[in-house]
Each structure stands twice: as structure tokens, then as C-alpha cells.
Amino acid sequence: MSENSEFRCGYIAIVGRPNVGKSTLMNALIGAKVSITSRKAQTTRHRITGIQTKDDTQFVYVDTPGFQTRHSNPLNRTLNRTVTNTLMASDVILFIIEAGTFGQADQQVIDLLPKNVPCILVINKSDRVKDKAILMPFAQKVMALFPFSAVVPVSATLRFQLDNLERETRKYLPLNPPVFGEDDITDRSEKFLATEIVREKLFRFVGDELPYTSTVMIEKFEQEGDLRRVFVAILVDRDGHKSMVIGNKGARLKEISTQSRQDMEKLFGGPVYLEIWIKVKSGWADNEAGLRAYGYE
């Protein structure tokens, strides 16, 4: 990368209520899948960083958990603390809402937004609105609730208007040299990414049957040349949950393993040997200290 006195680099928080497409948007912006996606709310439990370096700009996107409106359990309190800490440390905020939909959960996120950080209103899933004439009045209504710096309707899945979103975001990034390497796409380790991939498939195939307290641990991660050997434990609350994950004659676990391995090979650029076990845990998520011990931030 050539030296450039006008180089811009900064941290961009992606925030919004659960299931508005935050992870999908970040993956689309950086061109790689580093944050897991699911129709199941609370899929993103960690602060995930995605990096995109283009010419004279390095965008450091930070995907956050969806803000939880119920604070009664340790997981929700931990997730919300992650959101607020990210907002305070960001150079730009992308506040994501779903086109044509704005409710109390969206308003609660707006109430968290700091007024001293440039914030762009991103209206996602705009391709799903049949009558495009309603988008402008809808955007104006939301814009009246907060001093947004700009508004950009997008479709993360179709990559619609993402170039425009990047241009708007760059305007508010500080003049800084790059923080990461030119080819870096995340600051997370391969071990962490492997964990997230398995967790995504777990929620995708088991869905609402499995409690949120179920989690994934990497017991061993080895690399020899291009080959990675990954040994994973899925921790569930009860014996009955094991059968949910395993499925009829092991079919569900096999599908989780196959799709996880394929995603890892695509992301890591080499062959992966993957083994997954199902284990029953005991009391690890009874308090916030337990959550932190298992990697929640």
C-alpha cells in the first residue's frame, strides 16, 4: 500500500435491534463471511470486527449483538454492555433498521446513540418494499428522531447501494494510517471463526428447539500445512437436547458437520478435518462470570 497523507481509517459500529441484518451487511461490505447469520435472534453474541481496505481507506466494521429489551438474565446484560461499549469507542455508527418497520426496540437503540459521533441511518431490506414511494416518508419520519448525518437505503443480500454507503461512511472517518494489514479481513483467530461457524449451523438446523444457553467450544485446533484439524464440543443443558442436535440416526449432526466443514474450508482456503461431539454442561451460565469464562464479551 502506497503512503497517502489523505488515508482514512476508523472504527464503524453496526448497531440495531436483533434480526435487521447487521451481520449480513458487514459480511457484504467486506466481501467475506466473518460474522454468522441466522433468522434466530441473538445469533451474534460477540463483538466481531470485519476489515475492508480500499485504496486510501481502511474500514474497520464492528458487528454487535442486537440490543436486548429484556435485561433480566446475565446473557442479555452482557450483550447490551457490548453494544454500549462499542458505540462509545467508534468513529462512525451505522444504525440499521428494516425498511417500512420501526418499533419500540428500534427506538431503544436510538436512545443509546451518542450525539457526538456521526451516525448514518441505514434502511436495510429496501428491496422487499413493493411500493418504493413509501421509503422517503418512512426515512423522514425516522430522521426526525435523531440528528443522523445521512440516510442510505440498502439491500445487504443484493449488495444494493453498498458503494454509496461506503462513500458516505468514508466522509466521517478520521485521517489515520491503516491499523491492520491490507489483506486482513478480521482481527479474530481462525479458532474463534471455526467456533462461530459451528454455532451458526447449530442454530440454523436446530432452530427454536434448542435454548440460547447452548454453546460451542473448540477443544483442539491443529494445523499441518494447509490441513486444519478441528475438534468441537457442543454443550447443551440436558440429555434431551443431545437428541435434538443429533437427529434421526445422526442425520442432523451430520448436516451440521458437513456444512460447517465446507464453510471453514471456504474461509480458511484449505482442507478441514472436523469432529463434533455433543456434551451436557452443568451450571456454567448461571452468572456473568460464567459467561465471560466461555468467551462472551
Image (cartoon, rainbow, N blue to C red):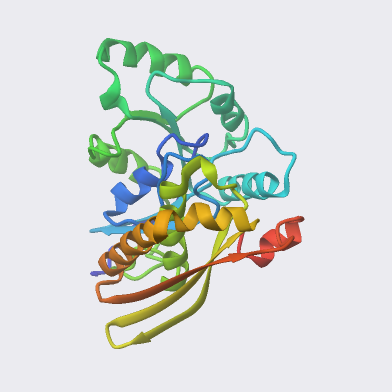
| Residue 187 seen by the camera | no
How far across and how far down the image is residue 27, in percent?
33, 51
Residue in the image at 37% along x and 23% along y: 99
Residue in the image at 24% along x and 41% along y: 163
Residue in the image at 51% along x and 37% along y: 18
In the image, 123 versus 151, the foreground residue is: 123
Task: In the rendered view, tell whether residue 13 sits above or below residue 258.
Answer: above
How far across and how far down the image is residue 220, in percent?
49, 80
To which quarter of the image does residue 123 belong?
top left
| Residue 190 seen by the camera | yes
How far across and how far down the image is residue 161, in percent?
24, 35
In the image, 166 versus 73, the foreground residue is: 73
How far across and how far down the image is residue 136, in percent?
33, 15
Quadrant containing the N terminus is bottom left
In the image, 246 versus 105, the foreground residue is: 246
Asked if residue 296 lies left or right of residue 48, the reply is: right
Asked if residue 171 lies left or right of residue 87, the reply is: left
Count of numbered labels shown in the rendering: 0
Quadrant containing the C terminus is bottom right
Residue sticking out furthest to the bottom? 224
Residue in the image at 62% along x and 48% along y: 79
